Image: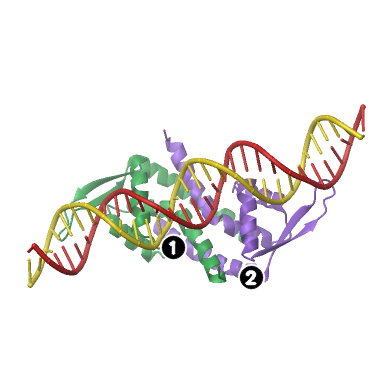
Chain colours: A green, B purple, C yellow, D red
Amino acid sequence: MTTQEEILENTKAQMRKGSLEFCIMLIISKGEVYASDILRDLKNADLIVVEGTLYPLLSRLKSSELLQYTWKESESGPPRKYYTLTDKGKKNLEQLKHTWSKLTKSINSLIK
Amino acid sequence: MTTQEEILENTKAQMRKGSLEFCIMLIISKGEVYASDILRDLKNADLIVVEGTLYPLLSRLKSSELLQYTWKESESGPPRKYYTLTDKGKKNLEQLKHTWSKLTKSINSLIK
DNA sequence: TGCTACTACCTTGCATTGCAAGGTAGTAGG
DNA sequence: CCTACTACCTTGCAATGCAAGGTAGTAGCA
């Protein structure tokens, strides 16, 4: 069975997923962060994401050379991977901002 | 091998996919259309979609009772399925417009 | 009647990817 | 050492976009 509510949530989830990679790069572009920082920032922006989604995505971006990381000690607990954008990542992100801008214009004109 | 260009196109594609279902419902909400009309309108909005994507999606929306269709004769060629939104579909779409508006606000504030 | 071309609808199989669930290991406090 | 906590990562499943291929109705024309 599939309720109306579930159908709606599914489509909403699709929207979130579509911008996920973009959002994560935006967050990293603001300064060195590690996974928990990213999860927190996404949550604050109403973009719920879990670890099982984030870690593979970070790995993917890393192996595409858009991200790099350095290990850093924590004051309390195990060491953390702090991510930053590479030059390639920064260029990529600029293009994505442009793409995002065009997409929202297209859709907003469909809405009217 | 994966080029910079391919990585970028992949992320762009993710963005498009995320809003696809929403866009298709927006197009149908403007009046009775059949598959080719939808493909044309999406293309005009820079949202490239192919048949193999559209037909299963229309079926899904139909079986979720967001869409309905009627067969109509064509002046030249085989008959066509003309789609419209059901009441449930209209309600759903209103919610999605709201979700879209919130999402764009969230992301735009991440961009700044 | 055949033949070709065109349009329209649909299906199959693959690749990608989000996510629930579970796993490993470092640190800290008692 | 034992428990709790944090951090990173993997496995297996399900959803879904898409390339490719398939079926069938219509039209024009010899």
Q: Name the residue that disc number 2 marks.
A: B88
Which residue is labeled 1 in the image? Answer: B106
Q: Image quadrant of residue A60?
A: top left
Q: Residues within 10 Å of mark 1 (few under 14, many from 20)?
A: some
- The CA distance from mark 2 to mark 1 is 27 Å
Percent x, y for residue A30? Answer: 32, 54
Q: Is there a contact, CB below 8 Å, between mark 2 and mark 1?
A: no
Can see residue A95?
A: yes
Whether residue A65 is visible here, answered yes or no, is no
Disc 1: which chain? Answer: B
Question: Label 2 is found on which chain of the structure?
Answer: B
- Label 2 residue SS: helix
SS category of the residue bearing label 1 = helix
Residue B2 percent coordinates (x, y): 42, 35
Q: Nearer the viewer, residue B86 or B31?
A: B86
Residue at the spot x=46%, y=59% of the render?
Answer: A16
On the rendered image, what quadrant is the N terminus of chain A found in?
bottom right
In the rendered structure, the answer to whether residue A87 lies left or right of residue B70 reads left
The residue at the point 29 percent across, 59 percent down is A36
**The quadrant where residue A68 appears:** top left
Give, as a three-letter code, the residue at label 2.
Lys
Q: Answer with left or right where residue A14 lies relative to residue C7.
A: left
C8 over B59 or under it: above or below: above
Instruction: Please identify the quarter of the rendering in which residue C29 is found.
Output: bottom left
Closest to the observer, A76 or B98: A76
User: Left or right: D12 with respect to C2?
Assistant: left
